[in-house]
Amino acid sequence: MEDPRQLGVKLKLQIDVVLHHDELGRYDVEQRLFVRKRRGESMQHVVMKLLSYLLFYRDDLEIEAGVGQHYKPDLVSVDERGDPVVWIDCGTTSLKKLESLVSSNPGTEIVIVKQREGELRRYAREAQQRLGQEASVQFVAFGDNLVDRLARMLGGRHRLEATVPEGMGEVYLSVDGREIRGEVVGESESRRVGEL
């Protein structure tokens, strides 16, 4: 039997989330998330979207929702006109795409999420060279192999309790009663490109 977490296999996750977010002052937020892993998409990419949803939670944050632009965000929150307020891109984001997002969406909080810190720092340096110091983009990555560990735990239906402490420097998860913790690398507030 094929492992549904492999690249070539589709998978639908149903995750009953209870979120405690100290940074936002939000507690016992309950959501039922349906997250799809498309054929050719890595489980790590799905996990980065899930972790981003938890870290940057807003009542109107949507996963894989189009906004009528050439590029589609992994997560997005829009205003009453349908313009992006928060745009989150996980995994591979070309510098050309980032440049387009910054120029097409002034005033939008743009967050780039990478799986590992080293990858994040290299990307941030390249982004600074490409965009200059004035572009405001937030960068986030995960330590402690959090993405890989969580990817191995998920598949199907789960109950996930998440705690994001003030400062957002780590995240505590309980997946079906199994505890997992990971470091969040980056800043919880917008920074200029390259300040990492």
Image: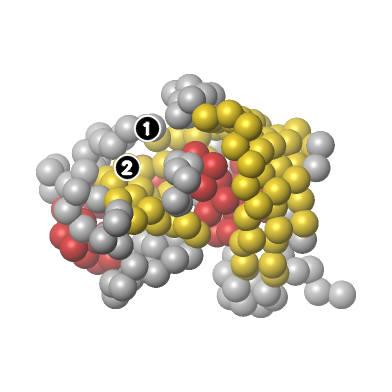
- Could you classify mark 2 by the number of other residues whose Cα lies within 10 Å: few (under 14), some (14-19), or many (20 or more)? many
- The residue at the point 55 percent across, 46 percent down is 51
Q: Is residue 129 left or right of residue 83?
A: left
Q: Which mark is residue 138?
A: 2
Q: Which residue is mark 1?
A: 187
Q: Nearer the viewer, residue 190 or 94?
A: 190
Looking at the image, tell me whether mark 1 or mark 2 is earlier in sequence order: 2
Q: Quadrant of the C terminus?
A: top left
Q: Are marks 1 and 2 in contact (CB under 8 Å)?
A: yes
- Could you classify mark 1 by the number of other residues whose Cα lies within 10 Å: few (under 14), some (14-19), or many (20 or more)? some
Where does the image place residue 92, in percent across and percent down from the top left? 42, 61
Where does the image place residue 110, in percent across and percent down from the top left? 30, 50
Q: Is residue 92 left or right of residue 135?
A: right
- The residue at the point 28 percent across, 72 percent down is 69
Q: Which mark is residue 22?
A: none
Q: Nearer the viewer, residue 159 or 170?
A: 159
